[in-house]
Image: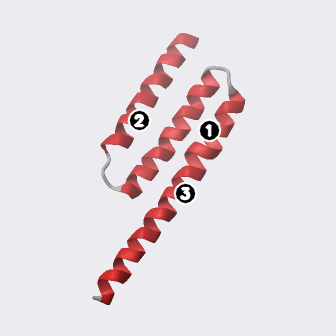
Amino acid sequence: MADALIVVALLLVAGAATSAVAVRDPARQALVLSVLGAVLAVLFTVLQAPDVGLSQLAVGSALTPLLIMLSVRKVRRRGRSKDGAR
């Protein structure tokens, strides 16, 4: 039973990572990266490392995508303000 859970978790990680690479829009990549972080947290929990899973959940699925989204927003705003100045 435990081996089946590990295989399912690894397949979910592979699918989420492939999706993160395949998405072209940076905002959507951040959302897919958030899903990847949550799936990795599940994988770590299945592998009996709950402390690493909690850290991954906090950093990988919440903090990093939030910083990426804020960066994308700021870059897009700067692009708009430069286009309006011309």
Q: As drawn, is 49 to the left or to the right of 28?
A: right
**Is residue 84 in view?**
yes
Marks 2 and 3, how far apart at CA: 18 Å
Instruction: Work out whether residue 18 or residue 78 is closer to the camera in this orientation and state it.
Output: 78
Neighbour class for label 1 at 10 Å: few (<14), some, many (≥20)?
A: many
**Mark 1–mark 3 distance (CA, rounded to whole Å):** 14 Å
Element class at badge 2: helix
Residue type at tag 3: Leu
What residue sits 50% from the left and 24% below the top?
Answer: 9
The residue carrying mark 3 is 66
Write the residue at 33% across / 55% down: 25
Could you tell me which residue is drawn at 50 percent across and 13 percent down?
4
Decide: is 4 above or below 37.
above
Please name the amino acid that badge 1 sits on: Gln
Residue 20's disc number: none
Quadrant in which residue 86 is drawn: bottom left
* Residue 51 place in picture, x, y as percent: 72, 31
User: For numbered disc 1, what is the local secondary structure?
Assistant: helix
Q: Quadrant of the N terminus?
A: top right
Indicate whether 60 appears above or below 39. Answer: below
Q: Is residue 1 visible?
A: no
> In this view of the protein, which residue sits in the foreground, 63 or 81?
81
Q: Which residue is mark 2?
A: 17
Residue 53: x %, y % from top left? 65, 33
Residue beneath the point at 43% across and 46% down: 32
| Quarter of the figure with residue 43 | top right
Amino acid type, callout 2? Ala
On the image, the x and y values in percent for residue 36 come to 48, 39
Crowd tier of the residue under label 2, counting other residues whose Cα lies within 10 Å: few below 14, some 14–19, many 20 or above? some
Q: Which residue is mark 1?
A: 56
- State how the image is colored: secondary structure
Q: Marks 2 and 1, Cα distance to the nearest angstrom?
A: 15 Å
